[in-house]
Image (cartoon, helix red, strand yellow):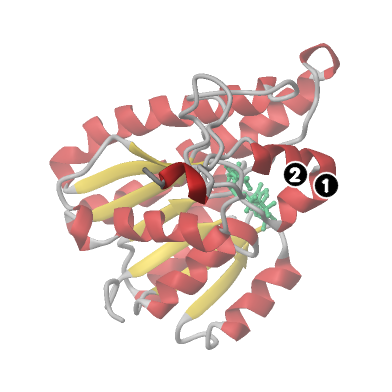
Amino acid sequence: MTRLADRVAVLIGAARGIGGAIARRFVDEGARIVIGDLDEVEGRRLVEELGGPNKARFLRTDIALESDAEAIVAEAMAAFGRLDILIQNAGIYPLTMIEDISAAEWDSVLGVNLRGTFLAAKAALHPMRAASYGRMVFTSSITGPRVTSAGHGHYGASKAGINGFIRSAALEFAPYGITVNGVEPGNILTEGMKAGRSQAFIDGMAASVPLGRLGTPREVAEAVLFLASAESSFITGTTIIVDGGQTLPEGPLPTAPQPHQHQA
Ligand SMILES: NC(=O)c1ccc[n+]([C@@H]2O[C@H](COP(=O)([O-])OP(=O)(O)OC[C@H]3O[C@@H](n4cnc5c(N)ncnc54)[C@H](O)[C@@H]3O)[C@@H](O)[C@H]2O)c1
């Protein structure tokens, strides 16, 4: 398929999980990509899986650092000569009660999730403005902008901040033909989710989703693909919720009707 034919994308936080699914989906659609991630082993393995340097490159990147944000944009320009799409998906989500969050932990979560989003956008702006074209898509969350649970004080603040930043960047970049949008995943079964959460927590989350299960990374990647493609040309400054209906219920979830209840 060719929805991203001739497009070049920088994908931050794409060695695994939701970002890995975005990388696979983008290459499937004809994009050439540069993956920036802290995890060099997984990142390089994914580049091989995706077909090697003609399709994908890897640059070790800590998106909380301005120099790394600038370096990965420069890498895309050097490798493929253009930059059409920026995905900032890197995020960390430690679960800590507010009274136990140290100032250093606060800074580290805000540093990757929110400052990293700003730094990536600022670095990508220059080539996109020069080309009068760009698609920026940031991974927010339902946690912060819509809902929350205990232990997400810093994380929720960072993701609500991303939604505010999306609106400002969309407004400022619109004159250059650059759209800025985001996705708000609900609970998605990824490596990071499995590592940081107990099975009981994951089962409890699945029980609170009207569609009855957690989402897959691919299901988030499909929404990101739409926002990164030509099909979303008149959409800017907004987010798509990908949560299986998790943010809908006002009360207990309805149970599925039994077959006999349909009989007259
Ligand atoms: N999994 C979920 O349920 C869920 C729900 C809502 C939002 N999100 C968001 O989706 C994004 C991806 O989540 P995931 O579950 O796939 O996570 P994950 O931990 O499986 O993958 C995150 C990737 O980002 C990379 N990364 C972390 N810090 C980085 C940094 N400073 N610089 C560059 N790369 C860095 C990691 O190495 C990893 O490859 C995050 O922004 C997360 O907040 C996830």
- Residue at the (54%, 33%) spot, across then down: 114
Give the quarter of the image for residue 28.
bottom left
Q: Which mark is residue 199?
A: 1
Q: Is residue 255 visible?
A: yes
**Can see residue 242?**
no
Residue sitting at 41 percent across and 70 percent down? 26
| Dot 2 amino acid type | Asp
Which amino acid type is shown beneath numbered disc 1?
Gln
Q: Position of residue 163 (x, y in %)?
A: 42, 29
The residue located at (59%, 79%) in the rendering is: 47
Q: Where is residue 230 in the image (x, y as percent from the top left)?
A: 20, 61
Respond yes or no on whether mark 2 lies under 8 Å from ligand 1.
Answer: no
Is the C-beta of the residue carrying label 1 under 8 Å from the nearest atom of ligand 1?
no
Quadrant of the rendered structure where residue 237 is?
Answer: top left
Please state which of residues 219 and 79 is positioned toward the viewer in this rendering: 219
The answer to whether 239 is drawn above or below residue 40 in the figure is above
Q: What secondary structure is found at the residue carrying circle 1? A: helix
Q: Looking at the image, do the residues carrying marks 1 and 2 touch, with CB atoms under 8 Å apart? A: yes
- Which circle marks residue 84 in the picture? none
* Secondary element type, mark 2: helix
Query: Neighbour class for label 2 at 10 Å: few (<14), some, many (≥20)?
Result: few
Residue 207 sits in quarter: top right
Q: Mark 2 points at which residue?
A: 203
- Tag 1: Cα neighbours inside 10 Å, few (<14), some, or many (≥20)? few
Residue plotted at (63% across, 33% down): 111
Residue at the extreme front: 264
Q: Which of 251 and 17 is in front in this view?
A: 251
